[in-house]
Image (cartoon, rainbow, N blue to C red):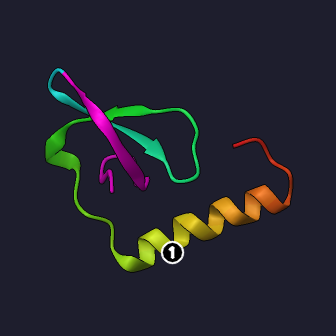
Amino acid sequence: MDTHTGKVGIVMGHEGPYVQLRPYGGGREWDAEPGVLRSATAAERLSAATAYANARSRGEAL
């Protein structure tokens, strides 16, 4: 969980002082400072998965 942006992401790697995250279900990666990251709660993970499933069912680009 990126507390600065409020987005749930999957850690993809590290680049310099930043952690690279990708949105659940794919999409454009973003960089975050390690100090603003924390583990997502079960509710936050479920919310991200639901948002992804809803967008996919509507045929939205992800």
Q: How crowded is mark 1: few (under 14 residues within 10 Å), some or many (20 or more)?
A: few
Q: Position of residue 36 (x, y in %)?
A: 21, 48
Q: Residue furthest bottom?
A: 43
Q: Residue furthest top?
A: 16
Q: Residue at coordinates 57% horizontally, 44% vertically from top-left?
A: 26
Residue 32, quarter of picture:
top left
Q: Where is residue 17 in the image (x, y as percent from the top left)?
A: 14, 26
Above or below — where is 57 with respect to 25? below
Query: Is residue 2 shown left or right of residue 24?
Result: left
SS at mark 1? helix
Which three-letter amino acid code belongs to the residue tagged 1? Leu
Q: Where is residue 28 in the image (x, y as percent from the top left)?
A: 54, 32
Instruction: Indicate whether residue 32 is drawn in magenta.
Output: no
Q: Which of 25 and 32 is in front in this view?
A: 25
Reading the image, the residue beneath label 1 is 46
Above or below — where is 6 with respect to 27? below
Q: Residue at coordinates 41% horizontally, 50% vertically from top-left?
A: 9
Instruction: Indicate whether residue 6 is drawn in magenta.
Output: yes
Q: Residue at coordinates 86% horizontally, 58% vertically from top-left?
A: 58
Q: Position of residue 49 (x, y in %)?
A: 57, 66
Q: Nearer the viewer, residue 6 or 22?
A: 22
If the image is split into quadrants, where does the N terminus sit? bottom left
Q: Residue at coordinates 74% horizontally, 65% vertically from top-left?
A: 54
How many labels, in total? Answer: 1
Instruction: Please state the extent of the stretch shown in magenta in the rendering.
Output: 1-15
If the image is split into quadrants, where does the C terminus sit? top right
